[in-house]
Every structure is written in structure tokens, then in C-alpha cells.
Image (cartoon, rainbow, N blue to C red):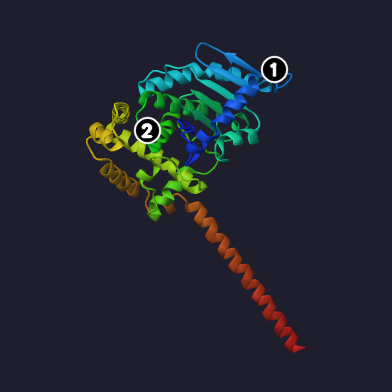
Amino acid sequence: MDNGFAGRLSCPGGISMRLQCKFSMVIVFIFIISAPPAVAMDTDVIRSDEVIVRFEKPLRDVALEVTRIYPSVRRELETALQSGIGFIPEVILMSDREKFLNIAGNRLVVAVAVPGKNLIVIDNSEMKTFPYSLRVTLKHELSHLLLHEHVGKGELPRWLNEGIAQWVSGGMAEILSGKGQAVLEKAVLSGRLIPIRELTLGFPDDAQLLRLSYEESRSFVEYIIKKSGIQGILGILNNLRDGDGIDTAVIRAVSIPLYELEAEWHEYLRRKFTWFVYFSSRIYEIIFAVGALFLVYGFIKVLIRKRAYKDTEDEDE
């Protein structure tokens, strides 16, 4: 989410703005974990040349894992986005889900990134919940921070921010549940895709629409990369950094207006997700459902016959 988000806080829907409002809570949390042991929770900090990790002492092994994997995560991001990370991020590990939610403000979120503060807050209690992992989550959130640093004062659309973060990290690390592709597929088949322009400033709060927003963002970014290569995405980012709006940035980078690019992507999705493909991929589910209906139908017929037989016996008596 991207609080102002950049990364797993390039956060869902209104989260970005809520996070801004709740950023003071993050500061309070940092103050608490930095306070003397007699007054605060049992917390500690590990510092390396590349990352700072604050954590509750029971999470020391997790904190050590963050410092161990950070260098490779950083290298992978810098290589993928062809941009160096010129800051030292601070990662806060939390074990209490409810306390984390006081900061994130959304139960679908497992991590938050705060651009400008180079801060990442991770709910460690969810890191062993499929499909989330510490590495993917860290990479996702760090990508948000890197994207905001790269663009600088330029305006970074939420769909682009979140789409790139998902593409580069390989997952929707901050969403707790829901099969994204199924949500996207259903939206394509029903003609209910959310216009990309509506995902510029933030994402909806509704759980289903939020998942769809994430999945659309990733799919659209992947389509741009499929069409123009990573250089197309990097060109858009560079143009945004130079002060272009998203429409100008896109046409300068990939030589096609944003609305035409979106229309092409919609057509690509319609070819990819057809009703035939939809039903074919669910053939066993359909067979099972039909079988269940026949079973229920047979059961009802048996009951009717038994009742009719009983009524006949009563009449004979």
C-alpha cells in the first residue's frame, strides 16, 4: 500500500488519503518503540548500511531476515526499474493485527509504505498467510518508495504506482484475500471494468472493487510492457518526473493516447477472457454442480414417490 502510498501502500482506494491522516499514528508508534523499556513495549532496532528495522523483541529473527534479504531485494528492484535507491528505508515490524489496523485503516491491507518518510510498516502476523511472504511484501512496499523517489514532485497515478509495484514484486502483497484474476475476468465478461481515469487518485473502499482496482492496475501495466517493453513504462515514469501529466507522459513514451491504449487493452482482455474459456476452465466445477442438482432432483422424486405410495396405502385402508 502506498500512503501517499507507494507500494503496498500505494494503498487501496481512499487509503492513501486516510494514511496521510493517520501518519501521526505511525510517528506515535515509532516514539513508543523508541521509548525506555520501563515505559514502552519490549522493542529493539537493527541498523545496517542499507536498512533500519524496528521490531518487538519476539520478532528479532524476522528483523534479521529483513536485513538479510534486503540487499538482494534492492538489487532486483533497481535492475527491474533501472533506477537506484538513494535512501535508507526504515522497516517497522508489528505483531498485533489490531494495532496495525489503527495505522492502515483497512482490513485488506498487510503492509504500508509512506513515501517521503522512506517508511514501511509490515503486519508480521499475516506474513505466513498464503499467498503472502516477507520477501514479496518487502519488495512490493520498497518499490512504492522507489517509484515516488524516481518521479520526485511529478504526479504518479495510483493505477501506475500499484500496477508497477505488483508487476515488479510478482503479487498483490497487501491484499489479504480474494482471487484477483477471477475478479478481473468476471468484470471483463460482464462489461464492468473500472475506467483507468477513475483509478488515478485512489481506489474504491468496497472490497470487491478494491480487488478489481488492483488487478486492473497490474493487468494494464503488464499490457503496456507487452506492447512497448519495460522502456515504455520507464519512459512514462521519466516524463512524469519531468513534469508531464499522465496523458502527455503516455503519448510521449508509447506514441499513443492513454484512452486508445486503454481501449486496446480492453479488446485484449475480451479476447483473453471469453465465456468459452470461462466455462472451460471451470468444467469440473460445472460437472459437480450439475451432478449435485441431479442428486437433489432424484432425492425429491424419491420423496414424492414415497409420499404418493403412502397416500395410496392410506386410501386402501
Q: Residue at x 43, y 18 (%)?
A: 75
Say which element carries label 2. loop
Number of numbered discs visible in the structure rendering = 2
**Residue 83 at x, y percent in the picture:** 36, 20
In the displayed structure, 209 sits above or below 4; it is below
Residue 278 or residue 62, whichever sits in front: 62
- Residue at mark 2: 156
In front: mark 1 or mark 2? 1
**Residue 115 at x, y percent in the picture:** 46, 27
- Residue at mark 1: 36
Tell whether 252 sits left or right of 100.
left
Task: Estimate how packed mark 1 is, as few (under 14), some (14 to 19) or many (20 or more) residues with alpha carbons within 10 Å.
Answer: few
Q: Which mark is residue 230?
A: none
Q: Residue furthest top?
A: 49
**Residue 218 at x, y percent in the picture:** 40, 37
Residue 276 visible from this viewpoint: no
For marks 1 and 2, the one nearer the N-term is 1
Q: Identify residue type, mark 2.
A: Leu
Residue 194 or residue 126, whichever sits in front: 194
Q: Residue at x 57, y 26 (%)?
A: 27
Q: Identify residue type, mark 1.
A: Pro
Among the 4 quarters of the image, the one containing residue 133: top right
Q: Mark 1 to mark 2: distance in Å?
A: 39 Å
In the displayed structure, 287 sits above or below 126; it is below
Pointers 1 and 2 in contact (C-beta within 8 Å) = no
**Residue 153 at x, y percent in the picture:** 36, 27
Tell whether 193 sits left or right of 120.
left
